[in-house]
Amino acid sequence: MRILLLTHAFNSLTQRLFAELTASGHELSIEFDIADSVAEEAGDLYRPDLIVAPYLRRAIPESIWRTHVCLIVHPGIVGDRGPSALDWAIQEDERDWGVTVLQAEAEMDAGSIWAEETFVMRRATKASLYRNEVTEAACRAVLKAVERFASGNFVPTPLARANGRGRLRPLMKQSDRAIDWQRDDTATVLRKLAAGDGVPGVADHLFGESCHLHDGHAEATIRGGQPGDVIGRRETALLRATVDGAVWIGHVRCGKGDLPIKLPATLACAEQASGVPEFALNGWWAASGPTWQDIAYREADGVGFLHFDFYNGAMGTQQCRRLLAAYRWALTRPTRVVVLMGGADFWSNGIHLNLIEAAVSPADESSANIEAIDDLAEAIIRSESHLTVAALPGNCGAGGCFLARAADLVWARSGIVLNPHYKNMGNLYGSEYWTYLLPPRVGEEGARALMRHRLPMLAGEALTSGFIDACLAPEPAAFRVEVARRASALADGDDFAAKLAAKRARRAQDEAAKPLAQYRAEELTQMRRNFYGFDPSYHVARYHFVRKSPQSWTPRHLARHRNPGWKVPA
């Protein structure tokens, strides 16, 4: 079928559905929901068999839902209505939740039901649940609903006859989210922070200044101060006392104006945070109890597992340098294989655009950041003592994809989305040695096509193209088990020495043909044009990305119906 995705933005769920529906043989085009007239025009141009709306912030106008069948993806159980479904579910500590696909009608979220899927609520942030459980349930439900629509004989169930336990709930306001530091226990504080992450955050104060709090983590042992006091810091996070313990705050939005930037807490409040006691961890080993730790190492069966759970997968200059130090240390351990695990939601999305935007000179910070991530990629490429694996449990984008490809092997969880291209960020050229790493995997023409494509691909497609080496179990726990089993087999294999020798020989041969330094110099020459050249596209794109500027148009690589020469197939 010809399916139009009508969406507020090309977010993680929309990307996944785009890739899944395309893989199922449907023809897809996308229109951002900018205005009624724009959406109406998209319908006239594309003449879709079906409209699917994965992510909207307003109701579909009657002029569209009376003309086309429009299926809304609602992140709530049957009967749940309102714009803050997941927020309320987390804050009210629901044990299970779901996704409902319903038909757009006059009353918002009250249309007939085409499909529903449920899941067990994990103790996690709204953003993490959305990227994982909600996305998986939405994929199952949408694929089921599309199949039912295509059959032509399915009759959706009116909401009034659905017997759902959900109910109409209002938009969650900051007064509903507010933390009472003198009364709320740690569990309550964490639920409120989780329900507001990553949008809109929880309105509060730090060091007497208004801000929005994000990225909360429990602390098992450190205590002190009065409830609400900032009692410690560690790297980029601040520790606040609660009535029965303490919580780490990883990120905040401070400052006046309409568009303050979300930043790591100790950087957003740098002057005040410098006077707070530091609670450094003892090296890179994974802590035994709940705490905030963005880089953590563990070992098992001759394998070192290096986790780096950076918020939203963004890797700033200092984070890259710290991770490089941790990686070099991991190579000194008595192991044979090092597995780079990334974080649960993202493996990596490359350089840290928010920190770059907040810098005195964004161009200089862009340059420093890309040099730092290149240093890390080079260290992985040049590792001769170990076999290396990048194990991707979560989505991966831009430079993060090529940082992963720097490892000997890349294993991805089935269902994750990869965006191995840079051009969407203002025609950024990219580095991380992609010009060295990519062509041997997919061929010269394949590399050019992939970098021009600018569309997401599922792990299965990445495996078929040769970009990754294995597509493993879709369930996160099963994925981790399979990664550990495979890595242990690599370390224990009788052919380990032969594989390591072959790796060294290939690297020596490649270096003789063209040194890594030359690849890097050529890439950075292009990058400096992005950072310092006459074309401001990268800086403009970054500005709008960081500040979440409303979309003013749909890019042509997404809206195929707006490309010159587009004609509806006969």
Image (tube, rainbow, N blue to C red):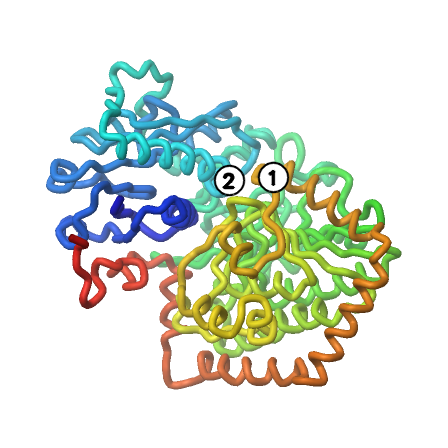
Q: Can residue 284 be seen by looking at this rendering?
A: yes
Q: Which mark is residue 317?
A: none
The residue positioned 59% from the left and 54% from the top of the image is 347
Q: Quadrant of residue 567?
A: bottom left
For the N terminus, the image quarter is top left
The residue sitting at the front extreme is: 570
Q: Can residue 171 be seen by looking at this rendering?
A: no
Q: Which mark is residue 476?
A: 1
> Which badge, 1 or 2, comes first in the chain's sequence?
2
Labels 1 & 2 near each other (Cβ < 8 A): yes
The residue positioned 62% from the left and 73% from the top of the image is 374
User: Does residue 327 appear left or right of residue 565 in this picture?
Assistant: right
Q: In this view, does 152 lie above or below 162?
A: below
Q: Residue 132 carries which label?
A: 2
User: Callout 2 environment at 10 Å: few (<14), some (14 to 19), or many (20+)?
Assistant: many
Describe the element under mark 2 as helix, strand or loop.
Answer: helix
Describe the element under mark 1 as helix, strand or loop.
Answer: helix
The residue positioned 74% from the left and 51% from the top of the image is 305
Q: Quadrant of residue 107?
A: top left
Amino acid at circle 2: Asn
Amino acid at circle 1: Pro
The residue positioned 64% from the left and 56% from the top of the image is 410
Nearer the observer, 303 or 211: 303
Residue 522 coordinates in the image, percent (x, y): 55, 84
Q: How many labels does the image show?
A: 2
Residue 310 coordinates in the image, percent (x, y): 60, 54
